[in-house]
Each structure stands twice: as structure tokens, then as C-alpha cells.
């Protein structure tokens, strides 16, 4: 079954399970939403995922993201809650893919699913940062008009800002000249530290040694040319020594009159491991094809060996038979022809038998041919000779 047919066949099942889990697992706010409303939004989200997964068409998804963002954030939902609702789609769909989808189509389907979810999460993160930057611009304009209220408005802005960044599941940080001047709760928990232990330390203290050179080059390029990538994957260093895959999305902003770097830090260990598994599946499939081709080549060589030898002997004995001076000499040639004909029939019998036997178990650790043709032919010929005697 291909991906499109699978999604069409299991549409109602996927929607039903997705709705059920959103109403029971994501948050108390979601559990209080009317079931009919949730079914309606999930129906739209399902259609958007279908278009993205089967046609690489993200237009419906972009429209839906804009709609659901307005619906949820306007009534007090946090970004982490909405992100959690979107992530449930993967949890619902992957078991169905593993059970129903053709194995050869699985790597592509998982890759498409990862890209869809990555697109969705990035869009939410971008929306969050855009809101934050817009809020700063609006406050700056207000401050120019209302100097007397400057202190009060700055405090309110900081309180709202901190509330927003503390609510998201992803880590949020601000660094100045490489040292952290702000980090939310999620960032600290991702690295195993308290807020007091994080503030003031250099960002590289939280990066695994094997990723430090690359991040240093990125930061230097951003400072000198501004052309460095604003999104990258690296290994973060946890307090307990673990090295975990993370993705940073950063941007240079102005904070308290100074140029600083603000960024979102997201754990992508599960995604990277899934990508590795997908790559391994592709490698195993290529290895299987290589073994199949080796088996086919061995088949051709073995058949050529037996059939050409038999044909040469039969031809030679036929010529000797024509030149035989006596019935005794002619009989010797005929016996040789009969023997080779029997061996040819044995080869054919072995081939027929092989069409009925089970092929050798294939494992990624071995390079055993799928069928040992030489062994099958030798066993068949030996049995034929034994029966004749």
C-alpha cells in the first residue's frame, strides 16, 4: 500500500485517535474545548497534512497554521500546547506507517512526515519571534510618545516577554558577546542547570567539544559578514556529560541599546535518530539488491559451466560416433552422450527444484547468496547418479 492510499484508507481512524488524544493528553485547556470544535480543526489539519505528504503542497498547512495560531493564542493557549497538539499527529501516524506501508516506501514517507512537522514547528517559532519583535517595535513607538510612562511600560513589556518565553517547551536565550544574559526555564532544564548557574556563563560551556569549532566559525561569520546560517544542528552538553542533538534558530537583535543574539534552542535527538534509522533502512535495501545481483551473476556462471561442458562432450561424442569403426566403439560414444544428457537433465531438475525451495535467510550481518546454485546442482546430480545405480 502506498502513502496516499494509506492516508485515505485510515483517514477516519487517524482523525479519531488524534482528537481523542488532544482532548485527553495535551493540556487542561484542550480538554475543556468543545469536542466538535476540535474535530473541525483536526479535519482541516488532516487535509493539510495529506496535501503536504502526498503532493509536497504546504499551502493548506500554512493557511491552517495562521488560523489555528489566532484561534488558540487569542484565548490563552501557550505555544507549547499547540506544538504538542501538532506533534501528536506523528505519534498517531507512525505505528500505522510501520504496520501498513510497503517497506520500500517507508524511508520516503518518514522523511516527508519529518519535513511536515519541522515546517509546522518552525512556522510557530517564527511566529513567536515575529510577535516578540513587533511587540518591541510597538513599545518603542509608544515610548517616544509617552516618555513619562517609560519605566512602567518597560516593566510591563519585560513581564509579558518573560511570561511568553517561560511558557514554551523550547529553550530561549539571549547572549551578549558570547555570554548568556537571559535564559528561560526550558533552556536551563535542557542542560541540567538552574537559572542562576546559567546566567553569565559563556555559551560554549553548554556545547559538546566536537561541535565547538563549527559553532565558533558560525558566530565569527555572523559578527563579521552577517551571512552565517541562522538555523543549525549541533551537540549540546548536559551537566551529566550526555551529548544530545539540538537545533538553534538565532537572530541578532537590539536589546537595551546593545547588539545581542537571541535564539530558540530545541531538542531534536528523536528526529536525528529517526533520520539515522531511515538512512540505515536505505543502506540495507541497497545491500539486499547487491546480494540479489551477485546471486544472479553466480547463476549465469554456474549454468554456463555445466551446460557448456555437457554440450562440448555431447558434440565430441557425436562426431566420434559417426566415425566409429565398430558397434562397440559407437556404443561407448552413445553411453557418454547419454551420461552428459543425464547431467543436463539434472541441472534442469535442480533449477525446477530451486523454484520451489525457500531462499536463504537474509541478514544485514551476512553476505550469503540468496540461493547456493552450485550446491543445489551437485546434490541433484549426486542423487540422480545414485538412483541410476
Image: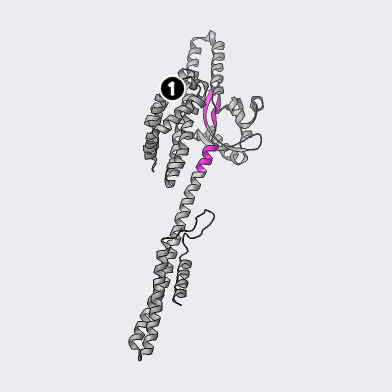
Which residue occupies the extreme top position in the image? 148
For label 1, the residue is 35
Residue 274 shown in magenta: yes
Left or right relative to 237: residue 333: left
Q: Residue at x 46, y 71 (%)?
A: 383
Q: Could you say where residue 253 lies in the image, as x and y percent from the top left?
A: 52, 25
In front of the other: 193 or 33:
33
Q: Could you say where residue 4 lies in the image, as x and y percent from the top left?
A: 37, 39
Residue 257 shown in magenta: yes
Which residue occupies the extreme bottom position in the image? 325
Which residue occupies the extreme left position in the image? 322
In front of the other: 362 or 333:
333
Q: Which residues lie in the magenta part?
A: 249-275
Q: Residues within 10 Å of mark 1 (few under 14, many from 20)?
A: some
Left or right relative to 246: residue 33: left
Q: Residue at x 62, y 32 (%)?
A: 191
Up/down of 305 relative to 356, above or below: below
Assign the magenta stretch its main secondary structure. Answer: strand
Q: Is residue 238 visible?
A: yes
Q: Could you say where residue 283 lies in the image, as x and y percent from the top left?
A: 48, 50
Dividing the image into 4 quarters, which one contains the N terminus? top left
Amino acid at each position: 500500500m502506498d502513502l496516499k492510499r494509506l492516508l485515505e484508507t485510515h483517514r477516519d481512524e487517524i482523525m479519531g485517535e488524534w482528537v481523542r488524544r488532544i482532548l485527553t493528553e495535551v493540556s487542561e485547556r484542550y480538554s475543556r474545548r468543545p469536542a466538535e470544535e476540535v474535530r473541525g480543526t483536526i479535519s482541516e489539519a488532516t487535509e493539510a497534512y495529506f496535501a503536504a505528504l502526498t503532493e509536497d503542497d504546504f499551502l493548506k498547512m500554512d493557511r491552517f497554521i495562521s488560523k489555528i495560531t489566532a484561534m488558540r493564542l487569542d484565548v490563552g493557549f501557550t505555544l507549547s500546547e499547540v506544538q504538542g497538539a501538532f506533534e501528536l499527529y506523528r505519534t498517531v501516524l507512525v505505528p500505522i506507517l510501520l504496520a501498513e506501508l510497503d517497506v520500500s516506501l517507508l524511508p520516503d514517507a518518514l522523511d516527508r512526515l519529518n519535513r511536515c512537522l519541522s515546517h509546522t514547528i518552525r512556522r510557530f517559532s517564527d511566529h513567536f519571534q515575529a510577535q516578540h519583535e513587533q511587540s518591541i517595535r510597538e513599545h518603542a513607538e509608544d515610548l517616544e510618545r509617552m516618555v513619562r510612562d517609560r519605566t512602567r511600560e518597560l516593566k510591563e513589556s519585560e513581564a509579558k516577554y518573560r511570561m511568553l518565553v517561560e511558557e514554551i517547551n523550547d529553550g530561549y536565550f539571549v547572549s551578549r558577546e558570547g555570554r548568556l544574559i537571559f535564559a528561560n526555564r526550558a533552556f536551563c532544564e535542557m542542560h541540567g542547570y538552574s537559572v542562576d548557574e546559567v546566567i553569565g556563563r559563556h555559551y560554549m560551556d553548554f556545547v559538546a567539544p566536537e561541535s565547538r569549532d563549527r559553532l565558533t566559525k558560525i558566530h565569527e561569520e555572523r559578527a563579521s559578514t552577517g551571512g552565517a546560517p541562522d538555523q543549525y544542528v549541533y551537540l549540546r552538553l548536559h551537566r551529566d556529560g550526555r551529548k544530545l542533538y539540538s537545533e538553534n534558530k538565532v537572530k541578532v537583535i537590539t536589546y537595551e541599546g546593545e547588539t545581542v543574539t537571541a535564539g530558540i534552542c530545541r531538542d531534536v535527538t528523536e528526529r536525528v535518530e529517526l533520520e539515522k534509522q531511515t538512512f540505515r533502512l536505505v543502506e540495507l535495501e541497497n545491500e539486499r539488491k547487491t546480494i540479489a545481483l551477485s546471486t544472479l551473476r553466480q547463476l549465469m556462471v554456474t549454468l554456463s559451466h555445466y551446460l557448456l561442458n555437457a554440450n562440448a562432450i555431447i558434440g565430441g561424442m557425436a562426431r566420434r560416433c559417426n566415425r566409429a569403426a565398430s558397434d562397440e566403439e559407437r556404443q561407448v560414444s552413445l553411453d557418454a552422450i547419454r551420461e552428459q544428457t543425464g547431467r543436463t537433465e539434472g541441472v534442469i531438475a535442480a533449477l525446477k527444484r530451486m523454484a520451489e525451495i525457500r531462499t536463504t535467510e537474509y541478514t544485514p550481518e551476512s553476505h550469503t547468496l540468496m540461493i547456493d546454485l552450485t550446491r543445489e546442482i551437485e546434490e541433484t546430480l549426486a542423487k540422480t547418479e545414485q538412483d541410476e545405480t
